């Protein structure tokens, strides 16, 4: 009786592994000619603000001798 359960379990395990590994179908294989219509924006926008004014940092001597 024990051997019957062992062989039954072994047969079930082998059949499940064969079914799982042998499947070459893809899930939902209805229409394989579907076109991806998503649009990807690849432009990079520079949002940093740059100060273009030049500041004179030299101290002018205004005293006359």
Image (spheres, rainbow, N blue to C red):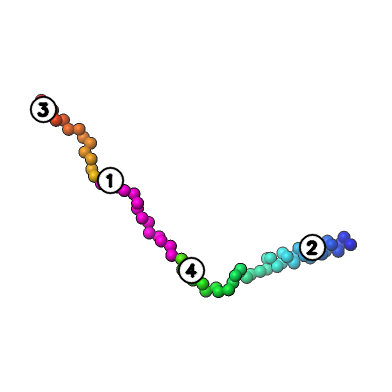
Residue that numbered label 4 is attached to: 36
| Mark nearer the N terminus (2 vs 4) | 2
In the shown orientation, is residue 31 left or right of residue 10?
Answer: left
Mark 1 or mark 2, which is nearer the start of the sequence?
2
Asked if labels 1 and 4 touch by Cβ distance under 8 angstroms, the answer is: no
Q: Give the CA distance from mark 3 to mark 2.
A: 108 Å
- Whichever of callouts 4 and 1 sits on the residue coming sooner in the sequence is 4
Question: CA gap, disc 2 to disc 1?
Answer: 76 Å
Question: Which residue is label 1 attached to?
Answer: 51
**Magenta-colored span:** 39-52
- What number is the disc on residue 64? 3
Left or right: 35, with 30 as reference point: left
- Residue lying farthest left? 65
What residue is pinned by disc 2? 10
Label 4 and label 3: CA atoms lie apart by: 78 Å
Is residue 33 left or right of 10 when viewed as pictured? left
Mark 2 and mark 1 residues within 8 Å of each other at the beta carbon: no
Q: Earlier in the sequence, mark 4 or mark 3?
A: 4
Asked if residue 48 lies in the magenta stretch, the reply is yes
Q: Residues within 10 Å of mark 3 (few under 14, many from 20)?
A: few
Most foreground residue, 52 or 15: 52
Q: Where does the C terminus fall, quadrant-wise? A: top left
Task: Identify the element where label 4 is drawn.
Answer: loop
Secondary structure, mark 1, is loop
Can you tell which of label 1 and label 3 is closer to the viewer?
A: 1
């Amino acid at each position: 009786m024990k051997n019957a359960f062992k062989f039954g379990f072994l047969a079930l395990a082998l059949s499940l592994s064969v079914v799982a590994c042998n499947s070459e179908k893809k899930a939902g294989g209805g229409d394989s000619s579907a076109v991806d219509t998503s649009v990807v924006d690849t432009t990079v926008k520079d949002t940093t603000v740059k100060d273009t004014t030049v500041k004179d940092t030299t101290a002018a001597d205004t005293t006359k001798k």
